[in-house]
Amino acid sequence: MAVAPSVGFHTKAERRGVHALAKTSDTSWILRGLPRSAVFGEKHERSRRVRSSYIRTPYALEYNPWSSAAEIEDAIFYRGVIVSAFAQIETMLGELAIRASLLPQYVQLRRTFPFSAEKRIAFLRKVFSTEPLMQYRSIAVSYLDRFDELASLRHMAAHARMQVLGGQITFHDIPQSDGTAITMRRQPFVFAGLELLAWRSAKLARAGHKLSELLNQRGLLPPLNEAE
């Protein structure tokens, strides 16, 4: 099927073919690089161009006529990378904790298996300080230290309200406290600063995957399905 440039297909028959393809369970059309106008029609594209100036992008989280679509979407992308990276990391650490708790060497630790992220980190620190995983203690502790350093960023990216204005990204939230006072936090970032944090978060996720694969290759932990 011949695809025209961004204006879509030349004939109605070709457009009907793409609409039919989009309605099926076969989603391979997404990978073929079809322009949005080819799938949804030129009318859809025109409606996107003439939308309210208060909504510069369909992904805007609040009405904002002062920031460009590129700025808003970049901010959402960087925030999304941070949240996605920590979702990967915390799931990986949870799986490691579960698998380690199945080993008889950690039976004492298993009786108080933690479920909160903070307690799970403490649990893994004890795990990697005891055989048979003690040989990887330096690698694991270094990784867990880096996780702790970015934990506040993870909470903020996941829970704060984000505002894109004046060439910067500002997060507003109510951080956790000891319960004696309510504190409002305002944390501004330049775009390059948040991009750097997104890069660091993604790098940490890849390092965690590498650590997990290393332990898998050594065969030191039972498979996760044994916990079922």
Image (tube, helix red, strand yellow):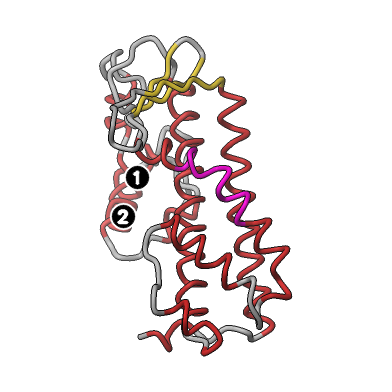
Q: Give whichever of 136, 42 is nearer the camera.
A: 136
Amino acid beneath label 2: Ala
Q: Would you call the spot at circle 2 few (<14 residues within 10 Å), some (14-19), or many (20 or more)?
A: some
Residue under label 1? 39
**Label 1, label 2: how far apart the Cα atoms are:** 7 Å
- The disc at residue 213 is none
Magenta span has 188?
no
Q: Position of residue 5 (x, y in %)?
A: 49, 36
The numbered mark, 1 or 2, whose residue comes first in the sequence reads 2
The magenta segment is: 144-154
146 to the left or right of 33:
right
Quadrant of the rendered image containing residue 192: top right
Rendered location of residue 228, percent (x, y): 35, 86
Say if 40 sits above or below 130 in the image.
above
Image x and y of residue 153, in percent = 49, 38
> Does the magenta run of residues contain 146?
yes
- Badge number at residue 22: 2
Q: Is residue 10 placed above or below 191 in the rendered structure?
A: below
Task: Name which residue type carries label 1.
Answer: Val
Quadrant holding the N terminus: bottom left
Q: Which residue is painted at 50% across and 48% down in the image? A: 33
